[in-house]
């Protein structure tokens, strides 16, 4: 795929149902999902699409759960994305590569546990679809300088002087959402004092479509399967969590020394390894907004919640926000309500709040459980994992959570 050019925004008087601030993975998915439901939007993104999709800009990959894949398929991205994703046929969880691991492997009827995609490939597919969608007015390379919400709608003034009109403002700018902060929405938040080091690896042995979550006292070490490159080399995405005090030193290592450290943590799992994408790093924290809505305002994705990447659920949680918001708005508009109606926003808040709190609490608990150092805690964890390995019902519960198929799912996330 090649990076699409920006669509030409419609006339200055064009009023749309939504004004979405943030055109990242969640924001653009929302715009496209809304368009498929007949809901129009303005999307504002400060970056240029060509910069976001350039080779090497973002080497991250995302685990797309079964439910999230249903969403992509239902909004018309399945054909473009299917050849680019690697199925996750199994997940192996281990405490420092010691005996007593858990293997999650669904039945043939259940299908895979999800698919791994390079973030760049998802962006390219989203941008290409949005470019040809008349229900989306795309404004790139600009920033909001003023947000106004009033009884009859919302207006957003851009730094190029343009004023956008809509019924509902959606904050999708990520963890540092100025829209959330301007509304005065506080967060329950803490710093893990860890940093995720992300890199692409090519390796000698095939990964067998298995994702590995290896827990070390200093933090989780994840190997996520990617499709082979065009030269047939086996590839995986690495997400290595290290303490903040050690991160600078790890990032300063030469490529050869860095690979030697990675190989030591992998214990020969995939044979010889090489770097296939440059190293990047991100600070890790827990952030959960105390509310998701305000007058004519809804938050989605990382603007509403940010979690540890331990199980790759952050993007999937944001895509559940998308599915729920589109369903709530669509139902209300069929009854003659406008998207900014307070009743609809209250329903969205109720629907999403419990799911977000539950998922984030579980992920935070796992981070803390596996972060306790010492031989005795390690032995206790391995004993517990061994028990889970022998309990099919409990394993199926965890697999359903990983696949995103638990709880009340929006229609877009169902088959």
Image (cartoon, rainbow, N blue to C red):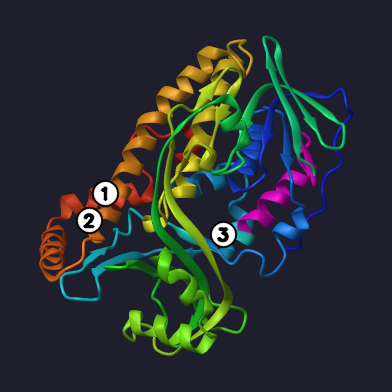
Residue carrying label 3: 82
Residue displayed at 45% across by 88% down: 204
* 62 left or right, relative to 264: right
* 76 left or right, relative to 108: right
Residue 294, can we see it?
A: yes
Residue carrying label 1: 365
Residue displayed at 40% across by 77% down: 207
Q: Using the numbered discs, state the Cα–Cα distance from disc 1 to disc 3 in whole angstroms.
A: 33 Å
Q: Of circles 2 and 3, which is in front?
A: 2
Query: Secondary structure under badge 3?
Result: helix
- The tag on residue 369 is 2
Q: Using the numbered discs, state the Cα–Cα distance from disc 2 to disc 3 in whole angstroms.
A: 36 Å
Residue displayed at 62% across by 36% down: 178
* 384 left or right, relative to 171: left
Q: Marks 2 and 1: CB-CB under 8 Å?
A: yes
Q: Using the numbered discs, state the Cα–Cα distance from disc 2 to disc 1 in whole angstroms.
A: 6 Å
Q: Which residues are magenta?
A: 121-141
Circle 1 Cα neighbour tier, 10 Å, few/some/many (<14 / 14–19 / ≥20): few
Residue 299 picture quarter: top right
Q: Marks 2 and 3: CB-CB under 8 Å?
A: no
Query: Secondary structure under badge 1?
Result: helix
* 394 left or right, relative to 303: left
| Residue 38 placement (x, y as % from top left) | 67, 27
Circle 3 Cα neighbour tier, 10 Å, few/some/many (<14 / 14–19 / ≥20): some
| Residue 1 placement (x, y as % from top left) | 72, 63
| Residue 405 placement (x, y as % from top left) | 36, 43
First reached walking from the N terminus: tag 1 or tag 3: 3
Residue 400, can we see it?
A: no
| Residue 311 placement (x, y as % from top left) | 37, 56
The question of residue 172 being in magenta is answered with no
Query: Secondary structure under badge 2?
Result: helix
Count numbered badges in the picture.
3
């Amino acid at each position: 795929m090649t990076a699409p050019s920006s669509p030409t925004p419609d006339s200055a008087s064009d009023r749309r149902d939504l004004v979405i601030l943030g055109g990242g993975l969640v924001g653009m998915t929302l715009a496209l999902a809304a368009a498929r439901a007949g809901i129009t939007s303005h999307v504002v993104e400060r970056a240029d699409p060509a910069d976001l999709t350039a080779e090497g800009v973002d080497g991250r990959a995302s685990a797309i759960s079964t439910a999230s894949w249903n969403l992509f398929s239902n909004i018309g991205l399945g054909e473009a994305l299917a050849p680019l994703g690697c199925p996750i046929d199994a997940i192996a969880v281990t405490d420092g590569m010691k005996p007593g691991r858990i293997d999650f492997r669904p039945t043939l009827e259940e299908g895979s546990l999800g698919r791994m995609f390079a973030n760049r490939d998802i962006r390219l597919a989203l941008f290409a679809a949005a470019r040809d969608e008349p229900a989306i007015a795309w404004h790139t390379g600009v920033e909001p300088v003023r947000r106004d919400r009033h009884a009859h709608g919302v207006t957003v003034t851009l730094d190029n002087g343009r004023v956008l009109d809509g019924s509902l403002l959606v904050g999708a700018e990520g963890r540092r959402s100025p829209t959330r902060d301007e509304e005065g929405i506080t967060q329950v938040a803490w710093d893990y004092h860890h940093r995720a080091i992300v890199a692409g690896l090519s390796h000698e042995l095939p990964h067998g479509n298995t994702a590995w979550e290896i827990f070390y006292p200093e933090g989780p070490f994840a190997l996520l399967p990617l499709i082979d490159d065009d030269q047939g080399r086996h590839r995986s995405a690495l997400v290595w969590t290290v303490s903040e005090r050690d991160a600078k030193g790890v990032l300063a290592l030469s490529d050869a020394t860095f690979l030697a450290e990675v190989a030591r943590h992998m214990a020969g799992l995939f044979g010889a390894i090489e770097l296939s994408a440059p190293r990047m790093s991100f600070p890790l924290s827990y952030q959960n907004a105390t509310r998701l809505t305000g007058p004519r305002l809804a938050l989605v994705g990382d603007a509403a919640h940010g979690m540890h990447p331990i199980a790759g659920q952050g993007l999937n949680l944001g895509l559940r926000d998308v599915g729920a918001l589109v369903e709530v708005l669509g139902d209300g508009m069929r009854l003659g309500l406008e998207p900014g109606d307070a009743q609809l926003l209250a329903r969205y808040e109720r629907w999403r709040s419990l799911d977000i709190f539950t998922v984030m609490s579980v992920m935070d608990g796992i981070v803390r459980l596996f972060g306790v150092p010492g031989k005795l805690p390690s032995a206790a964890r391995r004993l517990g994992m061994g028990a889970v390995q022998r309990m099919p019902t409990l394993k199926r519960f965890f697999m359903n959570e990983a696949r995103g198929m638990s709880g009340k799912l929006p229609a877009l996330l169902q088959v």
